[in-house]
Amino acid sequence: MLLKIRHALLEISNHPVTKQSAIIINNEIIITSGCILQPYVRPVAPFQTQTDKEDICPNTKIIHKLQQCKLINVQEGGSDEAKHLSALNYQVTFDRRKLPMPNARRKQPHILTRYCAKLLYLFNSAEISRHVLRFLNNDRTDRASETHNAVLLSSFLVLSMRCDGAKENFERFLRHIAHYLRYLQPIHTLDDVLVMCTPFGLENFYKTISIGKVSNVMGRDGCLFVLSNALALGCEGAAVFNNKL
């Protein structure tokens, strides 16, 4: 199956408004980092380590599940975690047009369109989380806050463009991604990469392209790598591409 991958801007319009770069696959599935949820998933201090209590807030339950690498199926809607996450308003902006003919380009000045999106799943990668904690491990950062941020930074949101109430199948999504990954080559140090980001993402949707290299690769199967790209001031995340992606 051929997967068409585009760069998009995901927005949570609840207060405070947050925006972040994402990738959209086949104009249907959206994937982005869980760090966009940091203003909305903030466990009440002191952090509760026991999840069997009835008065545990949904934010704490979300962090606990992510720490245990349990899939949060927001479509189910019955759990406190699903209700909390589905109460947020998700919107995605991207260029969905087909490339026009050169002489018709001037007739289509507005090429960006905003759509509603529906959160399907939230999950965490233990392998990536371990390495993110290494980056955040310093004496100046509060330990509890550091752990929660690391969990969200190593988590992923999967959203759908279909807001008609139809349920999506996670196994179907995984089959599509697994089929795509079979044709990928491993990432190595000094590989060329292209980063597409949205500087001043809190206000506009201007795409900025930065070219750099992979400076470090870590984790099982190179699941996490560090880039040397200098991102534009104010960018809200980025989508990474290279000739192997």
Image (cartoon, grey):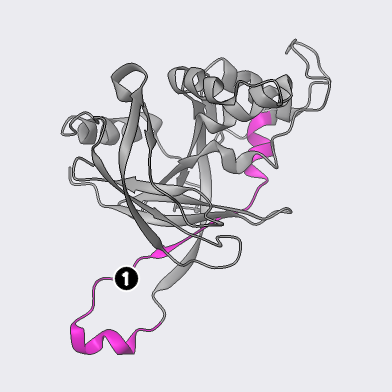
Q: Which residue is mark 1?
A: 97
Asked if 79 appears above or below 230 in the picture, the reply is: above
**Residue 57 image-quadrant placement:** top right
Asked if 105 appears above or below 43 in the picture, the reply is: below
Q: x and y percent of residue 181 in the render?
A: 23, 32
**Residue 209 image-quadrant placement:** bottom left
**Residue 217 image-quadrant placement:** top left
Q: x and y percent of residue 101 in the render?
A: 19, 82
The answer to whether any part of residue 78 appears in the image is no
Question: Helix or strand or loop: what does disc 1 sit on?
Answer: loop
Task: State yes or no: residue 99 in magenta.
Answer: yes
Look at label 1 and name its amino acid. Answer: Arg
Q: x and y percent of residue 89 in the render?
A: 63, 53
The answer to whether any part of residue 156 appears in the image is yes
Q: x and y percent of residue 117 in the render?
A: 51, 53
Task: State yes or no: residue 200 in magenta.
Answer: no
Residue drawn at point x = 23 percent, y = 42 percent: 245
Give the magenta-colored segment's residue range.
81-109
Front residue (pair 97, 221): 221
Asked if 239 appears above or below 104 in the picture, the reply is: above
